[in-house]
Amino acid sequence: MSSRVRRGIPAEPIVWPEVSAVRPEPLRPPSGPAADDLEQRLREAREAGRREGEAAAQQHLEAVVERLARSIEELSSLRARLRRQAEADLVRLAVAIARRILRRELTLDPEAVAGLVHAALQRLAGQEISRVRVHPELAHAVRTVLAQNCGAQSAEVVADARLEFGAVRFETERGDLDASVETQLAEIERGLADRLRRASR
């Protein structure tokens, strides 16, 4: 809808009616039984709010104390746990070092396998050995040791390329005995780990 400004027509001023200022009466506290009842309810509400606040603060404080107690307990057990982990790591490190030394020793001097063969013969305690499987590089040294210890009755030595270096496996009628370097080291590692577990209890 469009509008136009009409010129030349005098506009009459708008007169607003005067409103007399109304002053509100000042608030007066109620009196009588209703006022006493209101005062009582206010006191009860304040008391309930105070109790709720104290209960919430107590709950929060208990939660903080519980978290603190758990943290202290975890810290006290951390030292023992770290020591156990360090001991286990030391065992693994010692076995890894022994493994490298033994492999190097066998590589430089295959006759060093004699110790493994002697220990195996003692464990077999006179059982008849039908066959000994070894890594090809150790076959000659094992034959020599068996000939020295078992004489003419020495067992057949089989060079088995599938075996890892340092492997020596005895086959008897009662079963097999693995006298390999890795097997010996694994037994030593298990024994040390068991001893550490018993000591930490």
Image (cartoon, rainbow, N blue to C red):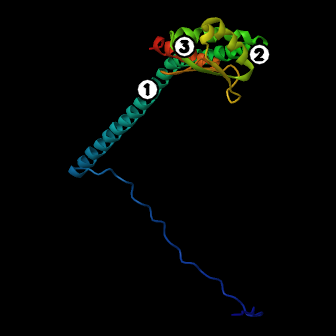
Q: Residue 107: which numbered mark, if any?
A: 2
Answer left or right for 48 relative to 119: left
Q: CA distance from mark 1 to mark 3?
A: 41 Å
**Residue 42 point in image, percent of width and height:** 31, 45
Q: What residue occupies the far top of the structure in this picture?
A: 148
Residue type indicated by callout 2: Thr
**Could you say whether the residue bearing mark 1 is in a helix, strand or loop?**
helix
Please tell me which residue is depicted at 52% across the width and 11% down the height of the picture: 123
- Circle 2/circle 1 CB separation < 8 Å: no
Residue type indicated by callout 3: Leu
- Circle 1/circle 3 CB separation < 8 Å: no
Q: Earlier in the sequence, mark 2 or mark 3?
A: 2
Q: Where is 94 relative to 171, above or below?
A: above
Which of 100 and 117 lies nearest the eye of the viewer?
A: 117
Assign the C terminus to one quadrant of the image: top left
Mark toward the viewer: 2 or 3 = 2
Q: CA distance from mark 2 to mark 1?
A: 62 Å
**Could you say whether the residue bearing mark 2 is in a helix, strand or loop?**
helix
**Residue 156 point in image, percent of width and height:** 63, 19
Q: Residue 192: which numbered mark, if any?
A: 3
